[in-house]
Amino acid sequence: MINKSIELFERAQRSIPGGVNSPVRAFKSVGGTPVFIKKAKGAYLFDADDNQYIDFIASWGPMILGHAHEPVVKAIQEKAIHSTSFGAPTELEIDMAELIISMAPNVDQIRMVSSGTEACMSAVRLARGFTGKNKIIKFEGNYHGHADAFLVKAGSGVASFNIQNVPGITAGVSNDTLTAPYNNLEAVKQLIEENQSEIAAIIIEPVAGNMGCILPQPGFLEGLRKLCDEQNIVFIFDEVMTGFRLGAGGAQEKLNIAADLVTYGKVIGGGMPVGAFGGKKEIMQHIAPVGNVYQAGTLSGNPIAMIAGYTLLNELKNNPAIYDELEAKTNYLGEGIKRVLSKKGINFRVNQIGSMISLHFCNHAIIDFESASKANIPLFNKLFHHLLKNGIYLPPSAYESWFLNNALSYEDLDKTITAIDSFDQY
Ligand SMILES: *Cc1c(COP(=O)(O)O)cnc(C)c1O
């Protein structure tokens, strides 16, 4: 029974567009009524009707050690007593910067912001200011937040990049964003050739998590790195999802590729609104007040947000076994899913790295947006609702990675596998 959620969703739609403050929460792609969450603890969410769910979203990543993680909650409480914002520098911001620099490879300096969107848009501005060039290359199906420059899609191929296809975004902005299919180095080479000396940055999700969990194919990131070096292009890793999730050093460390600039969000704030962008000192020194690339934020480095993130990151740094445990749990889930679905004779693919995993109903490899969209989306949506009814909360879209949190027990994973086993595909 989700009667209260149904009631709340109706009420929400009167005062909030679509009833939600971020579109994917509305369940548009899977259909049905979104459940309204009242509270959460560890691996479990509780909705307005007191139903309990095993959580595979972890607030899209931040709750990597489970909800209401005690050290984080306690740190927030203790900090809040001394005021929630000053608009002046604090020692805690230095501690946070030093901690991030000690964990993340190739980050000499870091600037805190309040969301992943802000981090990515600021990194691109900085790359433009640093190189004196205007255009950027992004990949189809990669999400870098909702800033204008990132909402441009290629439509049906690299040739159509100048078509304005998101209302509200000017043709001028669209023209400066070029797009290529993920895992397609040749397409990037072609774009660079057609736009000689005009590309300021290539921005990429080093593991794509916004169209499922899609891994870079061998040589792809290496090839991009080489192109960036040859063409004086700033290579930006958007690690908003992968940062502090794939390991303490994120995708850079896990995949052993160096980025020039890196953006963070999600895990970095421990559940508070935090983002950050950092990288080589040579580039970072171009930001105001040292340089002339302007970037600012009234609540940037906010003490409550910083102490939440600092407490979480510190635990991740000091206990690297967490990442092995997370990966072992994710492997276990993946193997279980493969076992029960193979028995049913359903075509499927499981993509996985570290604690990110996705399930696609198809008989082909999922390597980019096109292959992801050719999977059986209605069947995924059916599985989503089957699991929701069984108290298991997946991301409400076939185009999302699932995020495991370390509060999940093997019993929770067994329950999930059993629920998938009881799925009737017909
Ligand atoms: C979530 C996400 C963003 C945007 O972060 P917000 O905090 O929602 O603005 C950017 N890039 C990636 C890869 C993301 O997953």
Image (cartoon, grey):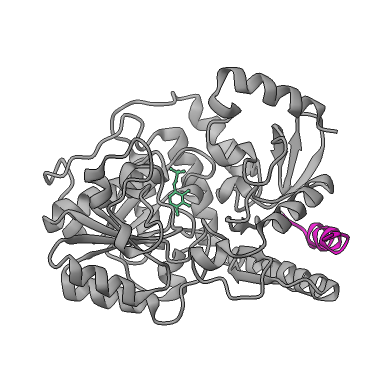
Does the image show residue 329? yes
**Which residue lies most toward the bottom here?**
219
Q: Is residue 314 left or right of residue 196?
A: right
Q: Nearer the viewer, residue 258 or 77?
A: 258
Q: Position of residue 86 (x, y in %)?
A: 34, 25
Q: Nearer the viewer, residue 148 or 64?
A: 148
Q: Which residues are magenta?
A: 408-426
Does the image show residue 94? no
Q: Position of residue 329 (x, y in %)?
A: 70, 66
Q: State which quarter of the image contains the C terminus.
A: bottom right
99 to 1, vertically: above or below: below
Q: Nearer the viewer, residue 206 or 348?
A: 348
- At x 49%, y 63%, the residue is 369
* Residue 196, quarter of the rendered image: bottom left
Q: Position of residue 235 (x, y in %)?
A: 28, 65
**Which residue lies most toward the right here?**
422
Predominant SS of the magenta segment = helix
423 to 55, vertically: above or below: below
67 to 331, vertically: above or below: above
Q: Position of residue 142 (x, y in %)?
A: 43, 57
Q: State the count of labels.
A: 0
286 to 303, vertically: above or below: below
- Tell me if residue 339 is in the magenta stretch: no
- Tell me if residue 420 is in the magenta stretch: yes
